[in-house]
Image (tube, coloured by chain):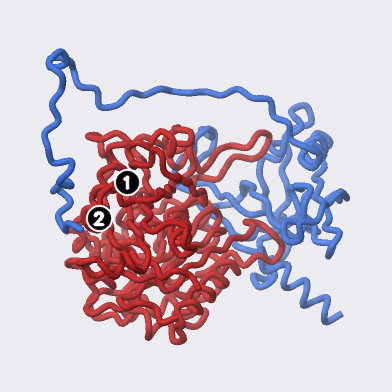
Amino acid sequence: MSTDPSVPPAALAGEVRLPEKLADVEPVRSVRTPIRLEYDFIPGDASSGYLNAFADRKILGQRSPVDGAVFVPPRGVDPRHGAATPDYVELPDTGHVGGFCVTRLPIPGRDDLEIPYVSAWIHLDGADIGFLGLVGGIDTSEVRMGMRVRAVWKPDDQLGRTAENILYWEPSGEPDVPVTAAGTNAWHAKQVAKEQG
Amino acid sequence: MAERTAVLGVGQTKYQTTRGDVSLPGLVREAAYRALEDAELGWDDIDAVVVGKAPDFFEGVMQPELYLAEALGAVGKPLLRVHTAGSVGGSTAVVAASLVQAGIHRRVLTLGFEKQSESNATWALSLPQPFSVSINAGAGGYFSPIIRQYMARTDAPELIGCMVAFKDRQHALRNPYAHLQQKELTFDQVVESPMLWEPIRFSETCPSSDGACALVLGDEAAGDVSTKPVAWIHGTALRSEANNFPGRDEVNPQASRDCADDVFAQAGIVDRRAEIDAVEIYVPFSWYEPMWLESLGFCEIGDGWKLVEEGATHLDGGDLPVNCSGGVLSSNPIGASGMIRFAEAALQVRGMAGDHQVDGARKALGHAYGGGAQYYAMWIVGADKPTS
């Protein structure tokens, strides 16, 4: 391989000659072509149940028939075993912060977010995976893994069939979950607790 | 037994923010020509073409492999596209190698590319799902919580990530193809650069690059007749896992560990740190260097940051030089980035890495990961033919 990237491959070294009739035409380097796509969203069984329940301020998960693990949001399947998860479980709107990120740059489509903001994996009480949520009502520098939180909902007259009904998660003031049992560590901590009876 | 397979040629374009002088076909053609010239072969010698790139909505060209078939000399030949998110450059090379190893083709051209100047990666990676909460700001937003977990687990000093970033930018100065050429950059500037996705600083992230990387792979007979040194493939492995399940170890995913165990076993490598001379791993955010060193078994779990701190991964004086090319932190044409790791590993064992050559390198690892740290591709290449 040539060690000089400014030397073109021999096959491309020749001069490109435009046809005479294009000699005076302004060269075009690029063209911006905005595109849009309209579609109907058909969420399927698991997501329909989940989104519909939000209108009643309820959070639904699904339970694995293999080992009882609870998934939220539900996807109709336990990805570890390929097993269908037909049974819904209602979950409380309390939990703790697992992994989180303090973001200091704007994101597309969310001009309403004040920077910096904290996005976090929220591990609901009784759920075995986290789902993404905003953390609010606290200085970003004070957020920590294991911090207990509860949901802050939109007013009743603004509720829709959407996870956006939860504005953010605020500290509940309860003692933190130890980091060794928080977030993705929670499942292992639960297995150890089970073994120890 | 699988057919012995060699890397006969490597071709790269200069990685930069905007290659405004070429279209997508022009970009890939340049890398392909360079690889063919290096291999001293022509289009007629190629039996099949295998292409990889990041998802189509980056540039908004659907199934670009079809549109690029002519530019890649693939008309009338088998043309395959591989999709594994950010790891795709690596997976693509593994698929191409398998076509030779299986005895299906004698010589295969494989290529990865991205034209980030014609796309918006952060947008493409943050596609809002209807009726769900849209707050994830691109790849940094996704990987930051995982890095935070690694820091919490290991109590690693806070500036380890900055040390990796500074080291890779120094390495890039010795690679004329690398995008970032920050001659004046100081360590303090890395530390003082603004936090984007705390704990990830601006200087600890990869750039957005245009570029393509191509490889020509051949069977044993093709490797034997090459007038230049070739890189012999000693092992290839792919693994994947779901991105969210109970108890998933996001810091050190099982798919990563399994993939590493497989590729090292194929290559007959026992002492990974002692037997590998050069490492090219996919590090788009600085902290992933110590994280992957642990997952790849180059050290004990929890010790990756110590290798960084003691300078073991530096080209000058390190016993395990990592990303001598400058790595993803210095050049990131996403769909090509994995293949660049594989290509750089090959250049090292061919002794053709120029100013960033590891003296006497005989065996090297190329590595790529993608998605939510879900997809893995690895290969080990050597200066000598594999014995088995």
Apparent colour of chain B:
red
Residue shown at 46% from the left, 53% from the top: B88
Query: Is residue A16 at all visible to an observer of this figure?
Result: yes
Q: Residue at x 52, y 69 (%)?
A: B150
Q: Give the residue displayed 31% in from the left and 64% down from the top.
A: B222
Q: Earlier in the sequence, mark 2 or mark 1?
A: 2
Callout 2 amino acid: Ala
State left or right for residue A85 relative to residue B277: right
Q: Amino acid at mark 1?
A: Ser
- Does residue B361 lie above or below A88 as drawn? below
Tell whether B5 sits left or right of B102: left
What residue is shown with label 2? B178
For residue B343, above or below residue A188: above
Q: Position of residue A91 (x, y in %)?
A: 82, 51
Please tell me which residue is depicted at 72% across the width and 55% down the height of the picture. A172
On the picture, is B154 further left or further right than A31? right
| Image chain in blue | A
Q: Count of labels shown?
A: 2
Q: Which residue is mark 1?
A: B209
The disc numbered 2 marks a residue on which chain? B
Packing grade of label 2 (10 A; few <14, some 14-19, many >=20) is many
Percent position (x, y) of residue B83? Answer: 51, 48
Q: Position of residue A100 (x, y in %)?
A: 57, 56
- How far across and down, in percent of the image, does residue A74 sit? 77, 48
Q: Would residue A57 be visible to someone looking at this image?
A: no
Q: Is label 1 in a helix, a strand or a loop?
A: loop
Compared with A158, B254 (above or below) is: below
Distance, label 2 to label 1, CA atoms, is: 10 Å
Say which quadrant the C terminus of chain B sits in. bottom left
Q: Secondary structure at mark 2?
A: loop
Residue B281 figure quarter: bottom left
Mark 2 vs 1: CB contact within 8 A: no
